[in-house]
Amino acid sequence: MKLNNMKLAGLYAGIALTLCSFGAFAEESHSGLALKHAQVAAKATDGKTIAEHAETAKTHAKVADEHLDAGIKSLDSAIEHGKLGHTDLAKKAAEEAVTHLKAAQ
């Protein structure tokens, strides 16, 4: 019985560590990942590696661009609501802008 409990504890610890590692990876921004993959592509010596990293860089750059666009829309909304005196809506839009701009960084 003790062995089963130890196995379960080990399994749970492994799952927890795996989930934590995904969280740490998610912290890196799309523009940062795009730059890293573009740098690897620029230093690579074979076409296949260059193409793979360039594709990955392009994917991250597109996501960063989408976040920038969404951030700009949220800022426009914050400006509009702020000028109309809608403080709560302006604040919510500004917070959304922060979220998108951080994701694009």
Image (tube, rainbow, N blue to C red):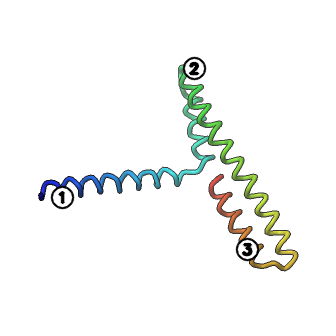
Name the residue carrying label 1: 5
**Residue kind at label 1, given as amino acid type:** Asn
- Give the spatial CA distance, label 2 vs label 1: 50 Å
In-image side of 18 versus 63 (left or right): left
- Give the spatial CA distance, label 1 vs label 3: 49 Å
Nearer the observer, 74 or 42 = 74
Name the residue carrying label 2: 47
In-image side of 76 versus 34 (left or right): right
In-image side of 57 versus 90 (left or right): left
- Give the spatial CA distance, label 3 vs label 2: 48 Å
Name the residue carrying label 3: 91
Foreground: disc 3 or disc 2? 3
Which of marks 3 and 1 precedes in the sequence? Answer: 1
Which of marks 1 and 2 precedes in the sequence? Answer: 1
Which of marks 2 and 3 precedes in the sequence? Answer: 2
Quarter where residue 33 is shown: top right
Q: Position of residue 5 (x, y in %)?
A: 18, 58
Q: Position of residue 94 (x, y in %)?
A: 73, 68
**Residue kind at label 2, given as amino acid type:** Gly
